[in-house]
Image (spheres, rainbow, N blue to C red):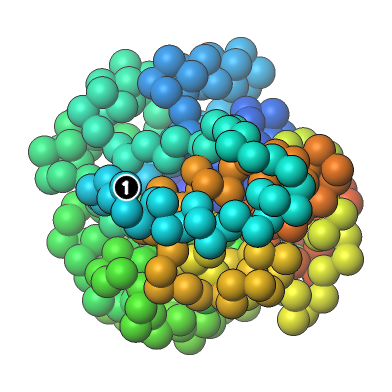
C-alpha cells in the first residue's frame, strides 16, 4: 500500500474511523471524531430515512468534514409465531420475577438497507457508505456507487473479503473476533464461524485483495494502531474505546460495566438479538449460555427481551441489555472522543 494512508484520498486527515454503533451514539460522537481529524460515522440501522437526514443535517451544521453512513444488510427472516411464542415462554420466569405480566416495550427495529434508504443516500450524498452483514442487492450497490460515495463493508474471513471485492467495494474492514458488537459474518449463519482474530485475519486479507483494508477488533490504543499498520492496514476502525467517551449515548448500566471490565469479561452470544455479537457477560447470557440455537433469528429475539431490558435499565442494571464491548475494552478509560482520536492516530508512525 502507498505510504500515505487510504483515508487521505477522501480528505480525512487521520487514519482513524470511529465505528458506527447503533443505539450507542448520535452525531455528537461522530462530530467530535471528525473535528479531531478522523472519520466520523453515523449508524443508520435503527433509524428511518427521515431520522437519518436529521442526523446528517445536525452533523453538517457542526462540521464540513466527511461522514460515513452505516447500514445493515441482513435478510429479514420470515415471521414465525411459534418460535416467538416459544422464546417468550422461555423468558416467562423473568416476567414473573419482575411482575411484568404482559408488559410491552418497543424493541429496536433493525432495518436492512433497501430502496427507500438508498434514495435517502442519493439525496444526502455522504462521502462514505459502509455496510455490515455483506452487501445489499447489486442494483442498490450500483446506485450508491453512482452518488460518488466510497463503499466499505466488513469481512470476517478471506473468502468474505474476496466476495466483497468482487461486489464492488472500495475498501474492506477486516473484522476480527476481538471486536465488540455484531460480527459482520455473511457467508454462513455463524454456526461454523471460524472466529479469526484481527491480527491473524488482517494480513491474510491484505494479501488476498487489491483494495485498501481497515483493521477492526482489538484496537484500543496507539499500540494497536501501530500493529495494524505494520500488518498492512490502511486505516483502523475503533468502536469500544469510543463507548467510554463523554460523547457516547450508552446507558448507565453499560457505562458501569465497561468501567469494571476485564480481559475475560466478554463473550460472543446470540441470546440478545438472535445474531452473534460480542458483549460483556450479563445475567441472561449466564442463564441461557452464550449461544442458544433455539433463539429466534436476528432481529426477532430482541422484542421479547425489550420489557425486561427496560425494567432492568430503569434500575441501572444491564442484566438483559446488549452490553457490547470488544476484548480490549479494559485498555480504554473515560476521555473525550477528540482526545482519543488523536491518541490513536499517534501510533500510526510507529507501525511504519
Image vertical order of residue 273 relative to residue 264, above or below: above
- The residue at 88%/66% (across/down) is 260
Q: Secondary structure at mark 1?
A: helix
- Find residue 271 and report its horizontal and vertical position in percent: 53, 64
Q: Is residue 121 left or right of residue 238?
A: left
Q: Quadrant of the N terminus?
A: bottom left
Q: Quadrant of the C terminus?
A: bottom right
- Find residue 99 and report its horizontal and vertical position in percent: 74, 43
Rendered image quadrant of residue 247 = top right
Q: Is residue 341 left or right of residue 314?
A: left
- The residue at 58%/67% (across/down) is 278
Tally of numbered tags = 1
Image vertical order of residue 117 relative to residue 250, above or below: above
Q: Is residue 257 left or right of residue 348?
A: right
Q: Closest to the observer: 96 or 122? A: 96
- Find residue 103 and report its horizontal and vertical position in percent: 62, 35
Residue that carries the numbered disc 1 in the rendered image: 81
- The residue at 85%/45% (across/down) is 316
Q: Is residue 71 left or right of residue 182?
A: left
Residue 316 in sight here = yes
* Mark 1 residue crowding within 10 angstroms, few (<14) / some (14–19) / many (20+): few
- Find residue 347 and report its horizontal and vertical position in percent: 71, 66
Q: Closest to the observer: 202 or 321? A: 321
Residue 160 in sight here = no
Image vertical order of residue 304 relative to residue 344, above or below: above
Most extreme residue toward the left is 139
- The residue at 88%/60% (across/down) is 259
Q: Closest to the observer: 116 or 229? A: 116
Amino acid at each position: 500500500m502507498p505510504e500515505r494512508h487510504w483515508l487521505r484520498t477522501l480528505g480525512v486527515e487521520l487514519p482513524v474511523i470511529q465505528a458506527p454503533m447503533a443505539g450507542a451514539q448520535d452525531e455528537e460522537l461522530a462530530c467530535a471524531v471528525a473535528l479531531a481529524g478522523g472519520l466520523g460515522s453515523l449508524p443508520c440501522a435503527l433509524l428511518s430515512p427521515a431520522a437519518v437526514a436529521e442526523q446528517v443535517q445536525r452533523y453538517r451544521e457542526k462540521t464540513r468534514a466527511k461522514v460515513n453512513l452505516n447500514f445493515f444488510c441482513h435478510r429479514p427472516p420470515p415471521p414465525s409465531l411459534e418460535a416467538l411464542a416459544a422464546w417468550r415462554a422461555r423468558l416467562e420466569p423473568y416476567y414473573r420475577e419482575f411482575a411484568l405480566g404482559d408488559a410491552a416495550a418497543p424493541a429496536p427495529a433493525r432495518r436492512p438497507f433497501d430502496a427507500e434508504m438508498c434514495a435517502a443516500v442519493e439525496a444526502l450524498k455522504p462521502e462514505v457508505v459502509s455496510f455490515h452483514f455483506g452487501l445489499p442487492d447489486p442494483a442498490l450497490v450500483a446506485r450508491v456507487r453512482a452518488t460518488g460515495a466510497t463503499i466499505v463493508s466488513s469481512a470476517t474471513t478471506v473468502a468474505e473479503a474476496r466476495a466483497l471485492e468482487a461486489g464492488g467495494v472500495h475498501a474492506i474492514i477486516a473484522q476480527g473476533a476481538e471486536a465488540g458488537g455484531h460480527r459482520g459474518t455473511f457467508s454462513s449463519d455463524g454456526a461454523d464461524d471460524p472466529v479469526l482474530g484481527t491480527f491473524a485475519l488482517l494480513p491474510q486479507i491484505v494479501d488476498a485483495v487489491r483494495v485498501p483494508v481497515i483493521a477492526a477488533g482489538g484496537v484500543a490504543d496507539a499500540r494497536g494502531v501501530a500493529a495494524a499498520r505494520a500488518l498492512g492496514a490502511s486505516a483502523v476502525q475503533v468502536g469500544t474505546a469510543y463507548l467510554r467517551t463523554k460523547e457516547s449515548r450508552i446507558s448507565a448500566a453499560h457505562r458501569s460495566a465497561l468501567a469494571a471490565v476485564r480481559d475475560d469479561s466478554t463473550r460472543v452470544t446470540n441470546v440478545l438479538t438472535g445474531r452473534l455479537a460480542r458483549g460483556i457477560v450479563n445475567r441472561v447470557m449466564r442463564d441461557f449460555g452464550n449461544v442458544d440455537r433455539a433463539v429466534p433469528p436476528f432481529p426477532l429475539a430482541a422484542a421479547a427481551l425489550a420489557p425486561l431490558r427496560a425494567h432492568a435499565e430503569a434500575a441501572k442494571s444491564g442484566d438483559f441489555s446488549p452490553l457490547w464491548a470488544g476484548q480490549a475494552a479494559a485498555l480504554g478509560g473515560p476521555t473525550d472522543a477528540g482526545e482519543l482520536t488523536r491518541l490513536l492516530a499517534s501510533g500510526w508512525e510507529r507501525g511504519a
